[in-house]
Amino acid sequence: MKFKILNGTVYDPSQNINGKKQDLYVDDGLIVKPEKSKIKDYQNTYDAKGMIVMAGAIDIHSHIAGGNVNNARLLSPEIHSNFLEYNLNRKKLLPGFNSRWTSEGTGYRYAEMGFTTVIEPAVLPINAFLTQLELEKIPMIDKGCLGIVGNDTLLLDALNKKKGQSFIDDYVAWNINSSKCLGLKVINAGGSEFFKRTGESESFNLDDIVPEYGVSSRQILESLNIANENLKIPHPVHVHCNNLGMAGNISSVLSTIDAAQGRRMHLAHIQFYGYDSKGKKGFSSGSQELAEKINKNKNISVDIGQVMFKPTMTISSDIWKQNQSKLHANPKKWVISEIEDGGGGIIPYEYKEKNFVNALQWAIGLELFLLIKDPWRVFLTTDHPNGAPFTSYPELIRLLMDLDFRNSELDKINNYAKDMSDLKFIKRTYSFYELAIMTRAAPAKILGLTDRGSLKFGSVADISIYNPKKPIDKMFRNAEYVFKNGIEIVKNGKVHKNLKTSTKCLKLSYDKNIHKKIKEWFENYYSLSLKEFEIDETYFGEKNFQNIEKAG
Ligand SMILES: [Zn+2]
């Protein structure tokens, strides 16, 4: 379908367009530049006078599907029943609208905020089939996954026996291809295997050794980072560092940045690592030091994992860490699960503004957003649902853009946390242009999704239109219009259509001789066979998976 969007104020950092009046033309799902003689064919018109026009937003790190998400749903059915009771009489006609945290609901709520692509950042190879089936069920937004590697016995054995980097490259490529992922995720490299073999310990650092394999966390991380580089995977290796959530863990993230040795690396939810151990409670903000390190190391990108004050679920494949956190479960229930070469921990939690630690976590996240100077290297996340549900983004955006609002929220938090935080001295606010970098142009670039995050000709027509006359949080909660693939899916802030979308993945080339070795390992040591790990596309819709082109 052909249509035009006239008179909008456009923010598109991919073309250095900063609040300029510009018209857009869409034909057959793409943004186009029609010849003058053809403009008359674009009869269907949206008048965006006084409105802000941006590309559809992209979330780089949000746990929206898979084994841990389902365990969390099972653990807390009350979330659904309360919501259902409240919504029963709303009589929405769209599937899944009246229940919470469903696959459909995830798509609807992202779309209403103007998001059109979301990355599920932690897919265990053994869970990949289920995760991909669930992702296919999420409408409105395109999806992509990061595959978890780093605690797998085959990899640890290969490092132990010095089988060489090309063996590891081939194994990683097989993993990415068979689970239809877009990139590589490393979670506490070696830490889960360490935990399974030794039980509890206070910390697991880069130079600690995984028993029986004799390899350090650093060796695992380095070999995977080199594999990521050798395989020319567009997204840098996506790292969940060691010692998440612990006082004094800033040393872990700083040494991980050094361990990257100048190679590209993405550090996930760094708010959970911005912790020093000063002050009378032994817990303080390390944001100045961490931000300075990130500002200096241009090879590093990060997302924040902002905490917001509300009840949520913490879900993670870092079972070592989750096992420690289970003491803080609120309400008192939790799941720690172990599955082939991985596992997960699910712990409900409520962040409270009067709680010293929670209040400082909130402040540290905001400090990092505001002290890291380059919006091309810092991304908007709450590590959904770990720091807060993704539906908190509008309020978080307001905290970044509106100084008075931020200061009034700061006044409500625990007094000692407020005293210890530098947030009160930081005057910076994000502009619409910087927000468009952080949520559109930069994530598209760093994920290698070259067809989006931009309004240039030839891009997918994923477009969000917002009304700046509304308060910032309301503006970003309910977009005036959202178009996905050139189809209007949101009008006046409400989803009015269930649109099937696709999952982006990579197809890497590698030496197929690795298959025999992987098969042997699985037959000897795994309870499930190799074919359980290799996704069979015949179970999915014909156009569900779309390979992205990789550069180089
Ligand atoms: Zn995460």
Image (spheres, rainbow, N blue to C red):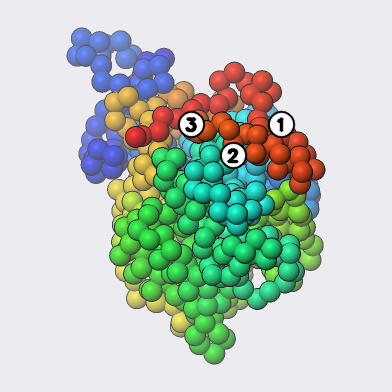
How far separated are the C-alphas under marks 3 and 1?
A: 19 Å
**Residue under pointer 1:** 531
Q: Position of residue 137 (x, y in %)?
A: 65, 31
- N-terminal of the pair, mark 2 or mark 3, is 2
Residue at the image point whose x is 65% and y is 61% from the top: 213
For label 2, the SS is helix
In the image, residue 227 sits, relative to residue 455, either above or below, namely below
Q: Amino acid at mark 2?
A: Asn
Q: Is residue 496 visible?
A: no
Q: Position of residue 338 (x, y in %)?
A: 76, 54
In the image, residue 330 sits, relative to residue 113, either above or below, namely below
**Residue under pointer 3:** 509
Q: Amino acid at mark 3?
A: Ser
**Residue under pointer 2:** 175
Q: Amino acid at mark 1?
A: Lys
97 or 198: which is nearer to us? Answer: 198
For label 3, the SS is loop
Q: Quadrant of residue 243?
A: bottom right
Dot 2 crowding, Cα within 10 Å, few <14, some 14–19, many 20+: many
